[in-house]
Image (cartoon, rainbow, N blue to C red):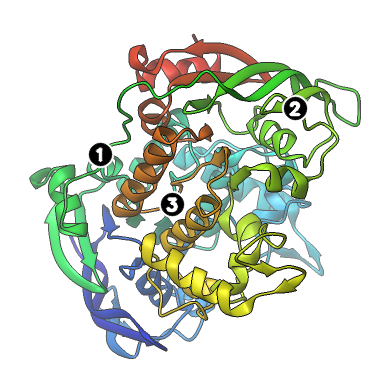
């Protein structure tokens, strides 16, 4: 096979940080080549360099044997490179077809030739097994269909080298299977695919080759059939692969959270977003909420936090919180790890010490009476960074400069700092490496042992099963099953989530 893209000795520095140091990688046509490493190891930086979003300080890039110098992503697209980002870049108020052709519209005179565009897009969708409805608004799509739109968008622009950044982070098992079928079709057509992931079992399942980088440098390039997940983990972080498990029964008599017939109606009066949800959560207990995205889990979280109006009742430590604001509920002892760390959990262009304030602006150490205690906040930010292994130069570092895993560890540390009685953890390890995963799982384990009640929502079924004491399955806004994690397999849970069981 010929080499589609080659990175030679790529290095990149930022103020106070060496992101890449002598990274090399060779990707052949007709193969899936995985790129793995800890958060902060330099994966995203080197892929942004390949896609023209950043320029290397040294090293070179070869595409089909010829040296290239990209000034921006348009240059990379011209060289047949496309990137499917972890955070989708779609216009919600446009149709699927409009999103795919946006910026590359075929013209018929001075108007857009939608007939030709539709024919080309539908032919590509059929060729690669990427089923879509071209006329539906993107805002009406779930995560899996949105990803298919992103893939078709880069293929429409002629990409032959595709970069997938954490493509399975938000997918349920059935959607992962569909994605991998699509990748197999792309590979068989001679595409070169770079697959960035923290899920090592998926890496070994889909990739032909794996490049491992640690601390900004390439440490190994191996054939996937020659290594195990444990060996890859050791190459990445120098330790064994952590497992999402809890030990013993820590549930206490005290009921921390109680929901009674909680319902959220739609504005149109059609099917409720969630309907008659009732359950109790005890201190020292983890209840996992399983469901395909879009089946009411997000709305349930918003009701508990006070972000949505609802009927029914919610009690916290045997007292109603129905009429309390979000801030009042937080002050009572309800913590929150958000689903989208960048949109819901951080001010990306602000320093970490300012991000420490978010949600805690009415309590110590952030406040001293009615005055912001900046020095104490900065000192406590440094403590969080040390205790939770947040890798950044210091409290004045902008949140946007941190890798995704370090952003997530910072949010976990911030929420745990107040030792809440109830933690609502929505996808707490989404998009983080095995090292950060293990650290976050350990924090949740210790909090459970100390009596914290935890609502855990995750698309990672192994995480749900391993970390939960009970599992509730949501389908179309209703709790359809309660399962014992000790007696449930990921396949059985996936079936329950889709209504097949």
- Are circles 1 and 2 on residues that touch, CB within 8 Å? no
In the image: residue 133, left or right of residue 194: right
Name the quadrant containing residue 308. top right
- Mark seen at residue 319: 2
Q: Earlier in the sequence, mark 3 or mark 1?
A: 1
Name the quadrant containing residue 272. top right
Camera-side residue of 270 and 76: 270
Residue at image coords 41%, 55%: 164
Mark 1 element type: helix
Real-space CA distance between mark 1 and mark 2, rounded to the nearest whole angstrom:
49 Å
Question: Which x, y percent locates residue 238?
Answer: 15, 58
Q: Is residue 332 above or below residue 89?
A: above
Q: How many other residues sit within 10 Å of disc 3, few (<14), some (14-19) or many (≥20)?
A: many
- Mark seen at residue 232: none
Q: Earlier in the sequence, mark 1 or mark 2?
A: 1
Real-space CA distance between mark 3 and mark 1, rounded to the nearest whole angstrom:
18 Å
Real-space CA distance between mark 3 and mark 2, rounded to the nearest whole angstrom:
36 Å
Is residue 346 visible from the viewing direction of this image?
yes
Total number of numbered discs in the rendering = 3
Mark 3 element type: loop
Q: Tell me the mark number nearer the camera, choosing from 3 and 1.
A: 3
Residue at image coords 73%, 44%: 139
Question: Which x, y percent locates residue 334?
Answer: 64, 41
- Mark seen at residue 431: 3
- Mark seen at residue 205: 1
Q: Tell me the mark number nearer the camera, choosing from 1 and 2.
A: 2
Q: Earlier in the sequence, mark 3 or mark 2?
A: 2
């Amino acid at each position: 096979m010929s080499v589609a893209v080659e990175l030679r000795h790529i290095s990149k520095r930022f103020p106070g940080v060496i992101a890449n140091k002598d990274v090399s990688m060779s990707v052949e046509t007709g193969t899936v080549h995985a790129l793995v490493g800890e958060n902060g190891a330099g994966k995203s930086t080197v892929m942004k360099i390949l896609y023209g979003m950043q320029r290397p300080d040294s090293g070179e890039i070869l595409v089909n044997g010829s040296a290239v110098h990209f000034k921006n992503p348009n240059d990379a697209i011209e060289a047949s490179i496309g990137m499917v980002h972890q955070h989708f870049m779609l216009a919600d108020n446009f149709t699927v077809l409009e999103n795919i052709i946006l910026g590359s519209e075929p013209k018929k005179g001075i108007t857009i030739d939608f007939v030709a565009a539709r024919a080309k897009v539908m032919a590509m969708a059929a060729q690669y097994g990427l089923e879509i409805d071209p006329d539906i608004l993107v805002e009406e799509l779930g995560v899996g269909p949105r990803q298919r739109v992103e893939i078709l968008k880069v293929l429409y622009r002629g990409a032959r080298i595709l970069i997938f950044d954490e493509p399975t982070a938000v997918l349920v098992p059935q959607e992962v299977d569909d994605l991998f079928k699509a990748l197999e079709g792309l590979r068989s057509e001679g595409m070169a695919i770079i697959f960035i992931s923290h899920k090592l079992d998926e890496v070994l399942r889909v990739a032909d080759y794996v490049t491992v980088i640690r601390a900004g440098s390439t440490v190994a390039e191996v054939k996937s059939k020659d290594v195990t997940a444990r060996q890859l983990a050791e190459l990445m972080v120098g330790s064994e692969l952590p497992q999402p498990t809890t030990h013993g029964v820590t549930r206490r008599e005290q009921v921390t959270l109680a929901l009674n017939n909680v319902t959220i109606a739609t504005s149109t009066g059609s099917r409720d977003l969630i309907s008659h949800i009732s359950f109790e959560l005890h201190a020292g207990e983890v209840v996992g909420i399983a469901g395909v995205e879009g089946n009411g889990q997000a709305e349930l979280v918003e009701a508990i936090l006070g972000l949505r109006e609802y009927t029914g009742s919610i009690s916290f430590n045997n007292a109603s919180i129905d009429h309390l604001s979000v801030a009042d509920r937080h002050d009572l002892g309800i913590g929150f790890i958000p689903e989208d760390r960048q949109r819901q959990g951080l001010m990306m262009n602000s320093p970490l010490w300012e991000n420490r304030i978010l949600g805690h602006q009415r309590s110590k150490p952030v406040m001293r009476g009615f005055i912001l205690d900046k020095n104490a906040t900065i000192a406590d930010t440094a403590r969080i960074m040390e205790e939770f292994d947040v890798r950044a130069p210091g409290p004045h570092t902008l949140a946007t400069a941190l890798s995704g895993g370090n952003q997530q560890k910072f949010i976990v540390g911030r929420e745990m700092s107040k030792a809440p009685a109830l933690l609502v953890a929505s996808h707490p390890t989404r998009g983080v490496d095995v090292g950060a995963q293990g650290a976050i799982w350990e924090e949740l384990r210790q909090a459970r042992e100390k009596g914290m009640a935890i609502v855990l929502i995750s698309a990672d079924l192994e995480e749900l099963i391993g970390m939960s004491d009970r599992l509730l399955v949501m389908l179309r806004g209703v709790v359809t099953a309660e399962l014992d994690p000790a007696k449930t397999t990921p396949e059985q849970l996936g079936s329950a989530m889709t209504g097949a069981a």
